[in-house]
Amino acid sequence: MVLSKACTYGVLASLYVAKQSENKSYVSIRDMSDELNISFHFLTKILQKLTAEGILQSHKGPKGGVLLARPAQSITILDVVLAIDGEKVFTECVLGLPGCGAQRPCPLHNHWVTVREDLKEMFTAKTLAATSDDIRELGLRLSLD
Amino acid sequence: MVLSKACTYGVLASLYVAKQSENKSYVSIRDMSDELNISFHFLTKILQKLTAEGILQSHKGPKGGVLLARPAQSITILDVVLAIDGEKVFTECVLGLPGCGAQRPCPLHNHWVTVREDLKEMFTAKTLAATSDDIRELGLRLSLD
DNA sequence: GTAATAAAAGACTCTTTTATCTTAAATTAA
DNA sequence: TTAATTTAAGATAAAAGAGTCTTTTATTAC
C-alpha cells in the first residue's frame, strides 16, 4: 500500500467534509464514520491530526463536528497526504536504501524519481473542491463498500 | 513504503546472486547477509520463498547456498517483486477502496492507473543481468549502508 | 561412517499499525 | 443549571510486519 490506511481514511473523510461543506454547519464525525464505513474512534484520531495540521477545524458538543479550515479550492489531496503520512512516500528509495539520491543512486533511482514525481503530481493536481465536483458529476464513490 | 521490506531485501539479494553468478558455485546466504547487512534468518526466509517460486535454486550442506534458477537475462525485477509481494501493488486502489476499477472508479483512479503502470514498467524493464551490469559499470550500490 | 557445514522449518519476540474502549472536557438546549 | 450530545484524550487490544533463535535435515569432506 502506497498510503497508510489512516491516510486513505483521511483523504476520504476530507472529501466527505468538502462535499457537505455547502451546509455551513459542522459535519458530525459519527455520521461520517457511518457513511464511509470507517471505525468511529479511529477516524476521530485521524481527524484530530488534520485539525492539528490546520486542514480542518473542530467543534465540541451538540451540533459539533468538523469543517474545512480553509476553502476547498485551496486544499489539495497532497495537503492531506502530507499531514498524515508525511513526505516519506515522496522521498524514500524504492529499494529502501538509506541516503539513496542523485549522488548515491540505487539501480532504480532515475526511473523511480519520475514515478514518484508523477505520484506527487497526481495528488497536487486535485483540490478537494475539484475532486468533490468530480464525485458529484461523474457519480464516483467514496465509501469503503 | 511501496514494497515491503522483505521484498526490497529480496530484490537486493537477487541482484547480489546475479552479480556472483559468474562463479558457478553456490552463493552463501551467510556471506550475502553479511555483505548486504540484512538479518541472516530473515534473509533465509525470503530466499526460501524465491526458491519456492522458481527464481532461485538452493543447496544444503557445505558449499551450499543459492543460485539463480534461470539465466539472469530472463529474470526481471518484476519477477522478484511478484514472487514476494504479489500483484497487489499493481492492482490495488490508491485510496484503498475495494473493487475500485474502470467500472467503479475512485476519484483518483484514472491517473493512478498510469502511475501504477509506469511503476510496473520500471520493474519490467530491468532484468537481473542488465541491472547487474549497470551496478558494475556505474558503480551503483546494493548494500544497506 | 563421523563430524562439520549450511539451508529448511518452525517457534518465538519485538515493533508498528490498526482498531476499540473508557473517561474527560466542552458545548448546546431546555 | 442540568442533561444530553459530541469531540478530545488516553489506555488497551488485536493484527501485521520485521526480526531472532532453536532444532531439524541434507550434504560434503575427511
Image: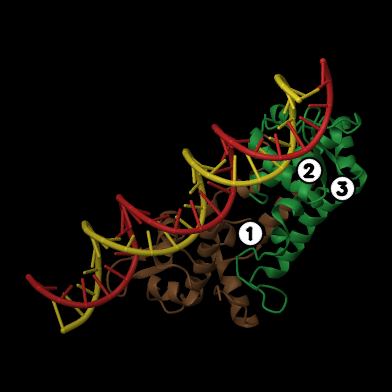
Chain colours: A brown, B green, C yellow, D red
Q: Residues within 10 Å of mark 2 (few under 14, many from 20)?
A: some
Q: CA distance from mark 2 to mark 3?
A: 16 Å
Give coordinates of residue D26: x percent, y percent.
Answer: 77, 38
Q: Chain of mark 3?
A: B
The residue labelled by disc 2 is A108
Q: Nearer the viewer, residue A82 or C9?
A: C9
Residue A98, can we see it?
Answer: no
Identify the residue at horizontal 64%, vertical 63% (top origin): B94
Residue B47, can we see it?
Answer: yes
Q: Residues within 10 Å of mark 3 (few under 14, many from 20)?
A: many
Q: Is residue B124 above or below residue B11?
A: below
Q: Is residue B10 above or below residue C25?
A: above
Q: Given the image, on which type of amino acid does mark 2 rest?
A: Leu
Identify the residue at horizontal 55%, vertical 73% (top origin): A144
Q: Chain of mark 1?
A: A
Identify the residue at horizontal 77%, vertical 49% (top origin): B52
Q: Is residue A12 left or right of residue A1?
A: left
Task: From the image, state whether disc 1 or disc 2 is nearer to you.
Answer: 2
Residue A5 image-quadrant placement: bottom right
Q: Nearer the viewer, residue B83 or C25?
A: B83
The residue labelled by disc 3 is B75
The residue labelled by disc 1 is A124
Q: Is residue C1 above or below residue C11?
A: above
Q: Residues within 10 Å of mark 1 (few under 14, many from 20)?
A: some
Q: Is residue A113 left or right of residue C17?
A: right
Q: Given the image, on which type of amino acid does mark 3 rest?
A: Ile
